[in-house]
Amino acid sequence: QVSLVESGGGSVQAGGSLRLSCAVSGDMARSECMAWFRQAPDQEREGVAALEVGVGAISYANSVKGRFTISRDNAKNSLYLQMHSLVPEDTAVYYCAASFSRRCWITTRSHEPPNSADFGAWGQGTQVTVSS
């Protein structure tokens, strides 16, 4: 099992950038996929980006393609989400998540955003607020 702790959230003006980090306690290599999700007030949790831990396949939600980049540092046991050209619609609590099921491969390999039902370990979230 792993435990996940996000950091790097904050408030930024539209057009700005933020880099979220997720510190993983436990062996990230034991997971099949790592991902970022977000949830805005009164909205359902949305998959933002995911990567397969083994082969590195990556997928993004259409709303963030070209603006967000998911990456990992195995040596630091960390996952990152670099966000550029932020817009107010990106305002949400962002969550890091890990999947121990190969079902997550279905979405990553079809270039679809991650499905929260495939992820069993979650961080506590970090708030991102983008003002216009």
Image (cartoon, rainbow, N blue to C red):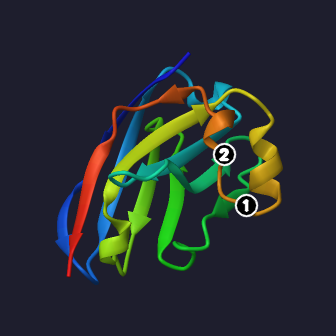
Q: Position of residue 57 (x, y in %)?
A: 74, 56
Q: Which numbered marker is on residue 115?
A: 2
For the point 25% across and 81% down, the residue is 14
Left or right of 65 in this view: 79: left
Q: Quadrant of the C terminus?
A: bottom left
Asked whether 71 or 3 is in front, the reply is: 3
Left or right of 52 in this view: 35: left
For the point 26% across and 78% down, the residue is 16
Q: Identify the amino acid type marked 2.
A: Asn
Is 27 rendered above or below residue 86? above
Residue position marked by numbered label 1 in the rendering: 112
Left or right of 66 in this view: 100: right
Gap between marks 1 and 2 measured at Cα: 9 Å
- Kindly state the secondary structure of the residue where label 1 is placed: loop
Q: Is any part of residue 41 visible from this angle? A: yes
Q: Are marks 1 and 2 in contact (CB under 8 Å)?
A: yes
Q: Identify the amino acid type marked 1.
A: Glu
Mark 2, other Cα within 10 Å: few <14 / some 14–19 / many ≥20:
many
Q: Position of residue 6 (x, y in %)?
A: 33, 40
Q: Quadrant of residue 12?
A: bottom left
Q: Position of residue 7 (x, y in %)?
A: 28, 44
Mark 1, other Cα within 10 Å: few <14 / some 14–19 / many ≥20:
some
For the point 68% across and 41% down, the residue is 53
Asked whether 127 or 77 is in front, the reply is: 127
- Kindly state the secondary structure of the residue where label 2 is placed: loop
Q: Position of residue 74 (x, y in %)?
A: 54, 40
Q: Quadrant of the N terminus?
A: top right
Q: Is any part of residue 8 visible from this angle? A: no
Q: Quadrant of residue 62?
A: bottom right
